[in-house]
Image: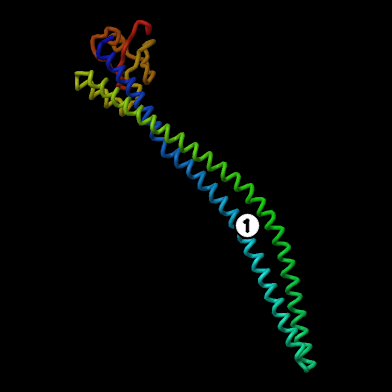
Amino acid sequence: MLPIIEKLLILQDRDRRLIRVRAEVATLPGQRQMIQAKAAAGSAEYEAIKKEAQQLESDRKKLELDADALKDRIGKVRAQQNETRSNDQYKAYEHQIETSQREISRLEDLQLDLMERIEAASRRVEVATKAHAALKTETDRQLADLASREKHLATELAGATEARASAASGIDDASVLSRYDRLLKTKGDNLIVGVAGGVCGGCHMKLPTQSVVSAKAQNELVACPSCSRILYFTSDMA
């Protein structure tokens, strides 16, 4: 095998590692965003459940205050009723008292209904509180794992970048390196390929006989006429 082919294969291997690490690094922001979005959705749901329970309790207290206000009003009307000497006015006061008592009865019925709903809401809050705590614990763990993974990948990326630079510096022919870099951009990390069975290992097209002969001769760089990938041949490909 040509020495330059050996160097290019090493460079290709370094590029494959570098591309893989870069791809993993690129997924980290999306993973973090997904974890945070799930946590935010869980928190929003938890807050909504708590808010619903708080609103029910607020409504119940308002009904209670309204009923107490009516009871106070009845007390004042009774006092006025006891002082009046007019039969018509007495009846008017009695009507006010009866109306207020019916309203109090209605408010108390509403309070009973709300108390049942508050009890159910309290159970939901209890379940949601445990679920929210568990979600937070899991979110913290996932984010910690992601931060650790990010740190590890940063180290791996630095090593892969350095290894790639070292492999590239070993190629003295600038034109070959430039050609390789162009192919890397257009063909990906499979650009130095074998010719097993007379077929290009990249595009899998049947190679002309002359291309196969030239690759076997190992005297020069040979390109696939179909995809321009650089070809190489080893004895086990015969």
User: Is 63 rendered above or below residue 162?
Assistant: below
Residue 64 placement, left or right of 186: right
The amino acid type found where label 1 is placed reads Ala
User: Is 3 rendered above or below residue 123?
Assistant: above
Along the line of sight, the residue nearer the viewer: 226 or 20: 20
Residue 91, image x, y percentages: 79, 88
* Helix, strand or loop at mark 1: helix
Residue 163: quarter of image: top left
Residue position marked by numbered label 1 in the rendering: 53
User: Is 80 rendered above or below residue 40?
Assistant: below
Task: Name the residue: 73% across, 80% down.
Answer: 75
Residue 194 placement, left or right of 47: left
* Crowd around label 1: few <14 · some 14–19 · many ≥20 (10 Å): many
Along the line of sight, the residue nearer the viewer: 60 or 158: 60
| Number of numbered discs overlaid on the protein picture | 1
Residue 67, image x, y percentages: 70, 72
